[in-house]
Image (spheres, rainbow, N blue to C red):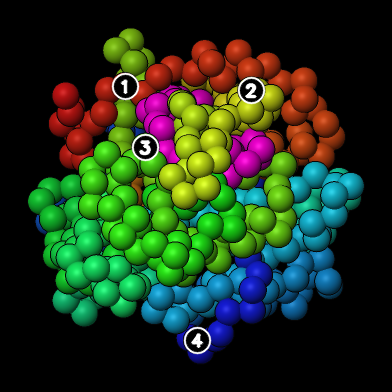
């Protein structure tokens, strides 16, 4: 892939229903997983051949733009630390008279299916049709299909080995901080990832950050500026466990998160959707269905006060209510009989003002997290079609409900009643406790 300089734009990636693929799906088939697989076996060779490389993604996005007849504009909004371009596919601009949705995915490089499904969604919207027209007449949708290309392209022993983390080495002196200043708590110094089926770990040797912990609710926050004013203060914040932890905003050290923050500020979305992967769960003691996705509407549980500006950020109750409505629409879209598609839990409660959706929600945007089951080290490319569907269907439902206004009539109590996180299952079938 030819590596390009950042142009100052950004994209978000999301997922929609099978109708966007031109496929008729009369009903959801019962899952054959028992109770949560199929996962890869401990010694099985993992295959990633069907998953798009960075070069293949760039080519596909370029093709979609050319075929879209102007419906989609592809822009580079940033550059990764290793030099890969970060792309946004814009269906519409940031018109304040339209609703605006940001859909982004693969902020963790080993959580791949969001990108695959986002591309399918972009293809459908680019092709037109009545459903796409109904959405795009009322809603601008921006897609960021891959925020972590460095982690996606990660290698181990010369073979593809996608990792959660970015590629970036912590060097405080280069930043103007005292030697020995501690790294942010979400830094992976040794460059390691969980092994196949989460057994042990693999050390691939390239340090990096968990990009989904590298955000700040002040979209204009600039750590280099703070360092230039008072390096001792910044070092003190990093060196103290009480101020360098997940309940605090981050200092935004990564080029990927700085670029995404600028894009969010440009769009000022009404709704933001982030797509991830997780482990395996059973729905309940009485219902052994494999949990297809977990949803989350709330990303902070207490106010956050920035130690630099002393500004306090708090979650607006109206924003939380709309977030719950969005998640309720998503939940109900998958309730089709007793299939595994409808086996949905809430993601565990978090207080992460330094996460992507945490920072975005504190700025007045309704949010939805979708966590698909399984990751590359537990599934390889098994069940790709079914797993993509568990994200595409709810996102499509949300886009339609925003376009026709029905999201306002959704019941937040539906979200509140979604079963809580429970009953994790280890890959291979053993129950975690």
Answer with mark 4 or mark 1, whichever residue precedes in sequence. Answer: 4
Name the residue tied to disc 1: 422
Answer with mark 1 or mark 3, whichever residue precedes in sequence. Answer: 3
Between the residue at mark 3 and the residue at mark 2, the CA separation in whole angstroms equals: 20 Å
Mark drawn on residue 3: 4
Q: Nearer the viewer, mark 4 or mark 2?
A: 2
Say which of 375 and 48 sits in front. 375
Residue 380, visible in the rendered structure:
no
The verdict on residue 144 being magenta is: no
Between the residue at mark 1 and the residue at mark 3, the CA separation in whole angstroms equals: 23 Å
For label 2, the crowd category at 10 Å Cα-Cα, with few meaning under 14, some 14 to 19 and many 20 or more, is: few
Name the residue tied to disc 3: 247
Say which of 43 and 232 sits in front. 232
Between the residue at mark 3 and the residue at mark 4, the CA separation in whole angstroms equals: 35 Å
Q: Nearer the viewer, mark 2 or mark 1?
A: 2
Name the residue tied to disc 2: 317
Where residue 156 appears, as percent x and y from the top left, is 20, 72
Say which of 138 and 237 sits in front. 237
Q: Quadrant of residue 311?
A: top right
Q: Secondary structure at mark 4?
A: loop
């Amino acid at each position: 892939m030819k590596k390009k300089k950042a142009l100052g734009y950004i994209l978000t990636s999301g997922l929609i229903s099978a109708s966007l693929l031109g496929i008729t799906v009369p009903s959801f088939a019962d899952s054959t997983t028992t109770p949560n697989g199929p996962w890869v076996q401990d010694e099985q060779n993992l295959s990633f051949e069907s998953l798009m490389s960075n070069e293949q993604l760039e080519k596909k996005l370029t093709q979609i733009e050319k075929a879209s007849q102007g419906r989609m504009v592809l822009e580079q909004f940033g550059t990764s630390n290793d030099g890969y371009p970060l792309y946004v596919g814009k269906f519409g601009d940031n018109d304040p008279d339209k609703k605006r949705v940001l859909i982004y995915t693969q902020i963790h490089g080993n959580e791949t299916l969001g990108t695959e499904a986002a591309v399918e969604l972009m293809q459908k919207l680019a092709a037109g049709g009545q459903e796409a027209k109904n959405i795009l007449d009322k809603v601008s949708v921006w897609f960021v299909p891959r925020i972590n290309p460095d982690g996606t392209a990660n290698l181990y022993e010369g073979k593809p080995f996608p990792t959660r983390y970015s590629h970036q080495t912590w060097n405080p002196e280069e930043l103007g901080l005292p030697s020995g200043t501690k790294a942010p708590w979400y830094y992976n110094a040794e460059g390691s990832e969980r092994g196949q089926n989460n057994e042990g770990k693999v050390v691939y040797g390239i340090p990096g950050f968990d990009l989904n912990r590298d955000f700040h609710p002040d979209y204009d926050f600039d750590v280099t500026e703070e360092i230039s004013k008072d390096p001792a203060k910044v070092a003190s914040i990093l060196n103290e466990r009480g101020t360098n932890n997940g309940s605090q905003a981050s200092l935004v050290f990564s080029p990927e998160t700085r670029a995404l923050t600028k894009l969010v500020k440009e769009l000022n979305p009404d709704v933001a959707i982030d797509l991830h992967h997780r482990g395996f769960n059973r729905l309940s003691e009485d219902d052994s269905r494999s949990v297809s996705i977990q949803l989350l509407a709330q990303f902070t549980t207490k106010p956050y006060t920035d130690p630099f500006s002393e500004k306090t950020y708090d979650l607006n109750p109206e924003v939380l209510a709309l977030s719950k409505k969005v998640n309720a629409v998503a939940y109900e879209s998958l309730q089709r009989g007793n299939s595994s598609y409808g086996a949905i839990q809430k993601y565990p409660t978090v207080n992460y003002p330094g996460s992507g959706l945490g920072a975005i929600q504190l700025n007045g945007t309704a949010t939805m997290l979708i966590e698909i089951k399984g990751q590359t080290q537990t599934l390889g490319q098994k069940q790709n079609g079914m797993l993509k569907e568990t994200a595409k269907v709810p996102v499509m439902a949300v886009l339609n409900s925003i376009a026709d206004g029905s999201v306002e009539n959704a019941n937040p109590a539906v979200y509140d009643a979604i079963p809580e996180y429970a009953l994790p299952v280890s890959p291979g079938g053993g129950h975690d406790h």
